[in-house]
Image (tube, rainbow, N blue to C red):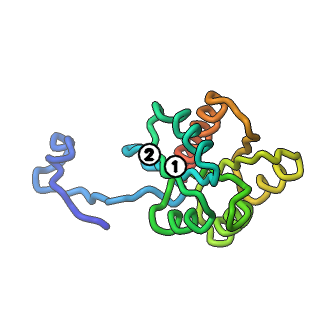
Amino acid sequence: MHSHRPLAETGMADFAPANCYLPTTTTKPSPGSIDMSTRPKILLVEDTVPLAHTYQEYLRQQPYDITHVETGGEALDQIANNSPDMLLLDLELPDMNGMEILKHLSENEIPIPVVVITAHGSIGIAVSAMQAGAKDFLVKPFSADRLRVTVANAIEAAQLAGIVA
């Protein structure tokens, strides 16, 4: 949306007549980019509640707003209605496989960075998850530092992609 404001309001009044107006543009972040003026929203999809609490505790002092859901259906609802900036996704969920969520994101061109979490850490699963669009892969159990670094890297990459886009 374009509007005009007096040049004097732009700090450039010394360079043009007082009645000169410059166009202004209202922009919003491009899809897949993270608005750096707010706390990134992370959707944690983990059916084992004690593990979800552990991961939330690992990230408690980080600048993120974390929402936890236990099923793939709840995750899809959150993705549709709340536009998280990042997904921490367990692959083994009670109602569906996390790969189905990755497929949904890809098919619907929803550019949310995803870090896959699983106890079943084979190379084949890792390759499949990455081919399906995951940005990284964590094998349970993992340290607090590993989770913090992985999340920070995924969010930073999304922020940089938004700046470049």
- List x then y, in percent, for residue 36: 42, 44
Choose between 155 and 123: the one closer to the eye: 123
Q: Residues within 10 Å of mark 1 (few under 14, many from 20)?
A: many
The amino acid pointed to by label 2 is: Asp
Lower sequence index among marks 2 and 1: 1
Locate the N terminus by quadrant. bottom left
Choose between 95 and 88: the one closer to the eye: 95
Which residue matches tag 1? 42
Choose between 45 and 51: the one closer to the eye: 51
- List x then y, in percent, for residue 165: 54, 54
Which residue matches tag 2? 65
- At numbered mark 1, what does the secondary structure look like: helix, strand or loop? strand
Residue at the (64%, 37%) spot, across then down: 150
Vertical relation: 7 (above or below) 153: below
Q: CA distance from mark 2 to mark 1?
A: 6 Å
The amino acid pointed to by label 1 is: Ile
